[in-house]
Amino acid sequence: MTWHIASGDSMRSLLVMGIPYQHAPEVSIVRTCSCACSCSCLLGATICHQGWQSCASCHPDGRVDGLNWDLLNDGPGNPKNTKSLVLSCQTPPAMSLGVRGSAEEAVRSGLRHTLFAKRHESEAAAIDAYLRSLRPLPSPQLLKGALNKSALRGKALFESTRTGCSTCHPPGLLTDLRSYDVGTRASYDKLTDKFDTPTLVELWRTAPYLHDGSAATVLEVLTMRNAHDRHGRASNLSRRQLDDLCAYLLSL
Ligand code: HEC
Ligand code: HEC
């Protein structure tokens, strides 16, 4: 993974911090893109105004960089944790506040407002095709492709009325595509903010969690960031049951 980062003021501040940077490649894979090569559009930093970042700077491998970014699509001053693009086309709306109706809409606004680039529609369509081609990778927690004993117990808990997890994260995509206030708002969020229920597929590789990355682990999602059981009933679970639930979540 090559990182193409920062020019101008941001490059100067990175230099001050001693972080190495790399110039955008001289040959533009985007300019020669015939759109059979969908992923080039996502990976090429030259697509960006001044060539200093690409979609993959924040979405390496179409997944996450683990950082929070204050994008302007939901207004300034409320940074959000980068979301994985796996299943994003199948799970509208897009963005944690659902400010984009679909991943396709997010692709076009990302080109314009995050990369500051006016690009041909064929390139946006190529990125759509790349996003749709992303397939979840099996979790390393699986044993020969199957849930281990602890994860199996966790699955039963997840699907039980005792926790209520699968009401909002039903089998399949593990999201009901609706937005809720599950008590996870923090000081940067508005009092009216509701968050789009995310898919839980590939959780094992998308830490930290929640819209603002405020939970370092899935256990923290269920405990530290789940006051009054507003985000599934977890306070009545024993430590072992919580571990089982986490084993299941990290196997998805
Ligand atoms: C500076 C970092 C950054 C760059 C560059 C970036 N993204 Fe994102 N992307 C994010 C963050 C952060 C989110 C989550 C925003 C939110 O939840 O409100 C996101 C969310 C998305 C989503 C919504 C996923 C979902 O299921 O809700 C899509 C689609 C997306 N980005 C595509 C792109 C594309 C395509 C590009 C390049 C044109 C791009 N992004 C460039 C940081 C970035
Ligand atoms: C009322 C609907 C609802 C219920 C019930 C629910 N969730 Fe969620 N879940 C959400 C929403 C909405 C979010 C996004 C919250 C945020 O980003 O602040 C979320 C986020 C998560 C995340 C973080 C995902 C990520 O990528 O950051 C995990 C893990 C999770 N839920 C697991 C569970 C478990 C386990 C249960 C049961 C104990 C549960 N959820 C019950 C709606 C629900």
Image (cartoon, rainbow, N blue to C red):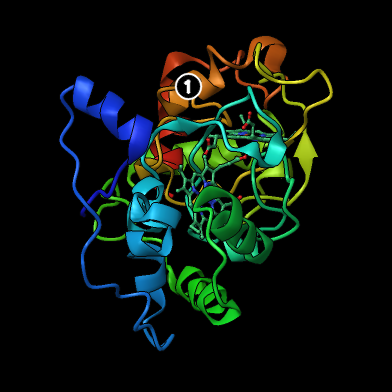
Give the x, y percent position of residue 187. Answer: 66, 11
Is the CB of mark 1 within 8 Å of ligand 2? yes
Question: Which residue is under mark 1?
Answer: 215
* Residue found at x 55% / y 41%: 156
Give the x, y percent position of residue 106. Answer: 63, 57
Q: Image check: 35 left or right of 113?
A: left
| Front residue (pair 8, 80) | 8
Label 1 SS: loop
Quadrant the N terminus occupies: bottom left
Q: Image check: 157 left or right of 160?
A: left
Placement of 11 over or under 140, stated as above or below: above
Is residue 120 in sight in this rendering? yes
**Quarter where residue 148 is shown:** top left
| Front residue (pair 244, 185) | 185
Give the x, y percent position of residue 78. Answer: 63, 24
Give the x, y percent position of residue 99. Answer: 74, 46
**Quarter where residue 219 is shown:** top left
Q: Image check: 174 left or right of 192?
A: left
Residue furthest to the right in view is 192
User: Count of labels shown?
Assistant: 1
Q: Image check: 73 left or right of 81?
A: right
